[in-house]
Amino acid sequence: MNGKNNIAIGFLIMGLFMAYGFILIYLRDFATGKEEWINSYSIGKHFETRLAHVHGNLFAFLNILIGYLLLHFNNKLTNTKAISWLALTGLLMPIGILTEVYFGIPPVLVLIGAVAMTTSVIWLGFSFCNLKINNDK
């Protein structure tokens, strides 16, 4: 069912990145060495982790929205399966940021996720531009 997985996974990923926000709060306010963490606000790991947190929640929300729209307009849009999978693949972007920060993995997942999410959003936009609405009541 196109869209259902986007909604379910979107909420789950959003919950995980929201919980990750608590880790960031802990590092800023309570952890040993918090002064060093605060001083690196706009550089290095601190910046990257905040970037992952924000994009994780944004991309999760986009999946929820895209999933809802795909479910609602499933019979009127084409290529819904491809759009759905691209949006889900987009979640690799914030996950890729975290794997880069914590495991030193090259940012290939970031690029794949960014391209996939951008493509899904643009493709869905064009799909809605081409949508034929029957105004007969």
Image (spheres, grey):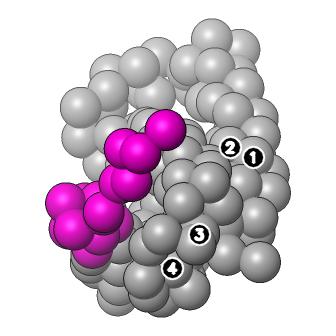
Query: Which residue is painted at 35% across and 79% down in the image?
Result: 116
Crowdedness of circle 1 by 10 Å Cα count: few (<14), some, many (20+)? some
Residue 4 at x, y percent in the picture: 76, 64
Q: Nearer the viewer, mark 2 or mark 3?
A: 3
Instruction: Give the residue type that dot 2 points to.
Output: Met
Q: Is residue 63 left or right of residue 9?
A: left
Marks 2/3 in contact by CB < 8 Å: the verdict is no
Q: Nearer the viewer, mark 4 or mark 1?
A: 4
Task: From this view, report whether residue 38 is shown above or below residue 75.
Answer: above
Residue pointed to by mark 2: 14
Marks 2/1 in contact by CB < 8 Å: the verdict is yes
Alpha carbon separation for disc pair 4 and 3? 7 Å
Specify the segment rendered in magenta.
122-137
Alpha carbon separation for disc pair 4 and 1? 20 Å
Instruction: Give the residue type that dot 4 points to.
Output: Thr
Rendered image: mark on residue 80: 4
Rendered image: mark on residue 11: 1
Of callouts 2 and 3, the N-terminal one: 2
